[in-house]
Image: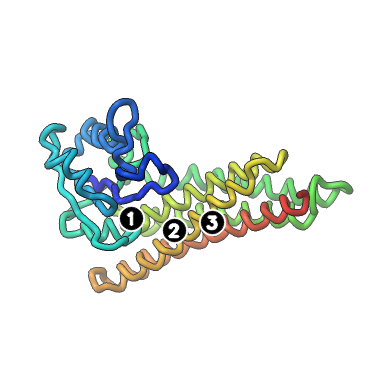
Amino acid sequence: MKAVVMAGGEGTRLRPLTSNQPKPMVPIVGKPCMEHILDLLRRHGMNEVVVTLAFMPQAIRTYFGDGTTLEMDVDYSVEEQPLGTAGSVRLARERLEETFLVISGDALCDVDLTALVSDLGNSERYAARIRDLEHTGDDLTHQIIGLLNTTFVTPFDRKDIHTLASTLDDVLDSTEALADLLVLLRIAKPLPQFVLQLDTLRRAVTAVALAVRDLRGMQGVVEACAEVRRAEREGDWLFRHGVAELYAGDFGAMEVLMWKDLLSEAESAIDTCEDIANTLESVVLKFA
């Protein structure tokens, strides 16, 4: 299986470390972050890599070359103008004929990639697990509403608590719907934009969880909510470009309908995360 390594980021939040080098070249334990990612890919048998470049592309090409020193086959796709996450992958589509893995070249990780790419057929098992979690979420929501109706003094505004409980449950509902659709539609090969959108949803949900956890002390809530908004903006971009890709003419009518439903459900979940962030910020402002 081929892998696409996204390495076009400027790393503005890491400056001055990235003032004269691209973010994937920032050294970690003696070698660039991207080299750790390529080592991970090689350990899992992914020796053919397409690297998407934008900011200071020559620095990365000079260092890694054609991949010979790493016993890999490294090719490059360079953006003439910023295309965003999905756009950079789409630009490299002529080099990608079969199912492929997309991974960031500037985010250090140690994921079991072999298990990940070999587990596409187990969507039904994962869907059952998600369904169980959604049912647990329903029970918790009912408990919160019941407690709210029998409590005279609440930690903060009664309406905000009700809104938070309901919208958190809505995110779980959307996640369950996505899992069910993946099983019912017998998805075997995911759309790249959909994979990226799900990763954006993961980031948004993680930030929501951090914000809710920090709500007791009101510390860190605003920062977590800002991350939710960044994810929501990226989710909007991915949704629009995903739909544009579907309408480009390379997909059959049924495929367009199927993937548009999945993209829309994921987009709905990300938007709901932003609704939660808005409520959380409102709570913080009331206590400021």
Say the numbered circle drawn on residue 229.
3
Q: Secondary structure at mark 3?
A: helix
Residue type, label 3: Arg
Is residue 144 depicted above or below 81 in this figure? above
Residue type, label 1: Ile
Q: Crowdedness of circle 2 by 10 Å Cα count: few (<14), some, many (20+)?
A: some
Instruction: Find the distance from the CA under tag 2 to the CA under tag 3.
Output: 9 Å
Instruction: Find the distance from the CA under tag 1 to the CA under tag 3.
Output: 29 Å
Q: Crowdedness of circle 1 by 10 Å Cα count: few (<14), some, many (20+)?
A: some
Tell which tag, 1 or 2, sits nearer the viewer. Answer: 2
Please report whichever mark, 1 or 3, sits nearer to the chain's N-terminal start: 1
Please report whichever mark, 1 or 2, sits nearer to the chain's N-terminal start: 1
**Residue at horizontal 64 percent and vertical 44 percent from the top:** 212
Occupied quadrant, residue 250: bottom left
Say the numbered circle drawn on residue 59.
none
Q: Which residue is mark 1?
A: 187
